[in-house]
Image (cartoon, rainbow, N blue to C red):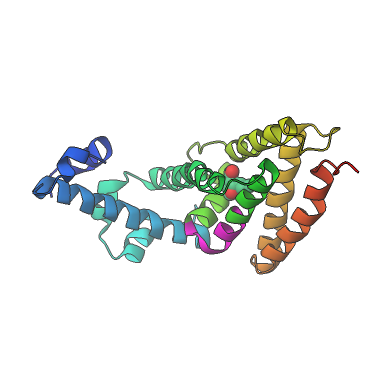
């Protein structure tokens, strides 16, 4: 492997020209390196989610991904970088999810519900989500500054609540920013309680209760 592979991956990927048919060695190496990085990140997420930050070592991650510690260090200089990468990966996904959900052409409030639905499933089956949540819960004990939690989500939901108000979908007395904070807090609180009491086994059910209690209160009443 070339010595500058790590930096080349970040700066050149994706490099459309190099993807032309007949592209040779270097691009393939980059793709392989990118895939390796993803594998490491995914395995690190599983371990972080299971054991927490302090109980996880680069050695644990290397064992999980069946590589040498050196191979892991090639992509991530230390455990701090791995933790940041997991959280960054998590936060980079929501705008993509929002675009997909917006593609359904739902009303703003129903788009918000669909976003929470997507997040609820991710809590159950996505190691990046589970690890990101655990790392953020432990952020006081993580020896590197993680991106601020909940802020992106609250802004994303607030944008939808403002759209709901502009379209007359929000109850007239409801402040869109308050509605966003309450919805995120209720959703995330239900997740936290379900996680700690039942390993999230009842979370889908608890989220349905939150949704069916909260969203009717946010909606403007249909005029008679
Ligand atoms: C989101 C997590 C897990 C909130 O925004 C965040 O910080 C999040 C971890 O802290 O999901 C989902 C409402």
Quadrant of the rendered structure where residue 206 is?
bottom right
Q: Position of residue 2 (x, y in %)?
A: 12, 45
Closer to us: 200 or 26: 26
Measured as percent of width and height from the top left, residue 63 is found at: 33, 65
Q: Is residue 70 above or below residue 107?
A: below
Question: Which residue shows up at 59% across the image and 53% down it?
Answer: 119
Q: Is residue 35 left or right of residue 17?
A: right
The majority secondary structure of the magenta stretch comes to helix
Magenta-highlighted residues: 119-127
Q: In the orientation shown, which residue stands out farthest toward the front? A: 224
Closer to us: 80 or 84: 84
* Image vertical order of residue 51 relative to residue 142, above or below: below
The quarter of the picture where the C terminus appears is top right
Q: Residue 65 at what x, y percent from top left?
A: 32, 63
Residue visible at 28% across and 47% down in the picture: 75
Check residue 121 for magenta coloring.
Answer: yes
Total numbered badges shown on the rendered structure = 0
Q: Is residue 180 visible?
A: yes
Q: Is residue 15 part of the magenta span, yes or no?
A: no
Left or right placement of residue 58 versus residue 119 in this view:
left
Report the side of 102 relative to 32 (left or right): right
Residue 76 versus residue 30: which sits nearer the camera?
30
Q: Give how far across and how far down residue 173 sits, in percent.
A: 86, 32
The answer to whether residue 52 is visible is no
Residue at image location 25% in from the left, 48% down from the top:
74
Q: Residue at x 24, y 53 (%)?
A: 70
């Amino acid at each position: 492997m070339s010595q500058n592979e790590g930096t080349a991956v970040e700066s050149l990927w994706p490099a459309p020209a190099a993807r032309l048919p007949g592209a040779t060695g270097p691009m393939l190496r980059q793709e392989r390196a990118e895939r390796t990085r993803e594998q490491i990140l995914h395995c690190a997420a599983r371990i972080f989610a299971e054991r927490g930050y302090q109980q996880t070592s680069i050695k644990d991650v290397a064992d999980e991904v069946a590589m040498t510690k050196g191979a892991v260090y090639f992509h991530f200089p230390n455990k701090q970088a791995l933790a940041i990468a997991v959280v960054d990966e998590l936060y980079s996904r929501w705008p993509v999810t929002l675009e997909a959900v917006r593609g359904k052409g739902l009303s703003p409030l129903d788009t918000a519900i669909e976003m929470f639905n997507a997040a609820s499933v991710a809590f159950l089956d996505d190691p990046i989500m589970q690890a990101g949540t655990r790392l953020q819960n432990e952020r006081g004990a993580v020896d590197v500054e993680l991106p601020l939690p909940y802020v992106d989500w609250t802004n994303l939901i607030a944008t939808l609540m403002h759209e709901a108000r502009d379209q007359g979908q929000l109850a007239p007395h409801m402040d869109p920013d308050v509605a966003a904070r309450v919805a995120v807090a209720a959703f995330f609180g239900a997740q936290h309680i379900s996680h700690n009491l039942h390993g999230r086994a009842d979370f889908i059910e608890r989220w349905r209760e939150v949704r069916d209690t909260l969203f009717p209160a946010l909606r403007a009443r249909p005029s008679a």
